[in-house]
Amino acid sequence: MKKEEKDLDSFKKALARKEKLVALLAPSFIADFDYPLIIYQLRARGFDKIVELTFGAKMINREYHKILKEQKDKLFISSVCPGVVETIRNKYPQYRKNLIPVLSPMTATAKICRKLYPKHKLVFISPCQFKKIETNQSEYVDFAIDYNELRKLFEENKEEINKKIKILKKKKTNKIGFDKFYNDYTKIYPLAGGLSKTAHLKQVLNPGEEVKIDGILEVEKFLQNPDKKVRFIDVTFCKGGCLGGPCVLNKNLPDKRKRLMKYLNYSKKEKIEENKKGLIRKAEGINFSKVY
Ligand code: SF4
């Protein structure tokens, strides 16, 4: 059978066929969308399950911690941002071996979801086009749509969505929040340096051994003239991390940071059922490594 295309049209066809879909939502969504409204909107638009990427981030953080603790004689470059991965593949292939051999939070979450929802199709909702390249290379994610396409999808179906939201709100089901992986501290992942902060890398790296760089021009500057003391660079293609992604409409970085921190604090106070949290035992036996 021909492999299904992963473009927007194919996603819309899957939606029209009422296939069971899981939305994989990265915490950068909060830059442009409101929580919990987005959950209602996604459900009303036909998504069966909605999960947060934060659990995948937590799982890969553990891998980073382990690798950086055990392998002290090599420079490692974070591989969570496909913009950086593609730049290294195309312009600096000599650094390919330095990309840390771990999946991105998107693919890690998708791999866990494959186990939990084997019959569903997985849709990543993305702040950039690079995630579409990663999706096309991934056997775990079925589609990626960006924030602009999501906005359009909500806009085109506004009346129908609003009607369904009213019904959902009346029902008072337990389907208001995320279905799974409503983790808290890794919600700061889309900030520049969010990875190293949440992976507690200070425990395994000495001062001066770690550098955080956001913005591809700065990343390239480092690659052209690396500091030999540095063992790990936490890098993102976009200035400001994923909050600065090209499909994020809000261009006010302080405002986006404020919205993210508000969301983080809100989530800490929300009562979360155990089955909605990201529990490490749920991911036992899953291999999160990847060679770039
Ligand atoms: S930093 Fe930019 S290019 Fe990289 S994953 Fe985030 S939004 Fe995409």
Image: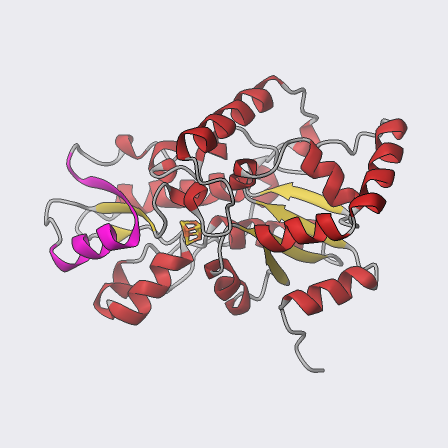
Quadrant in the picture for residue 275? top right
Q: Residue at x 40, y 37 (%)?
A: 191
Q: Residue furthest top?
A: 269
The quadrant in which the N terminus is found is bottom right
Q: Could you say where residue 136 lies in the image, as x and y percent from the top left? A: 54, 68
60 shown above or below 31: below
Apparent side of residue 84 relative to residue 186 in the rendered image (left or right): left
47 shown above or below 137: above
Quadrant in the picture for residue 225? bottom left
The quadrant in which the C terminus is found is bottom left
Apparent side of residue 205 relative to residue 269 in the rendered image (left or right): left
Quadrant in the picture for residue 50? top right
Is 200 in the magenta? Answer: no
Q: Could you say where residue 97 lies in the image, as x and y percent from the top left? A: 27, 63
Is 209 in the magenta? Answer: yes
Which region shows up in magenta? 208-225
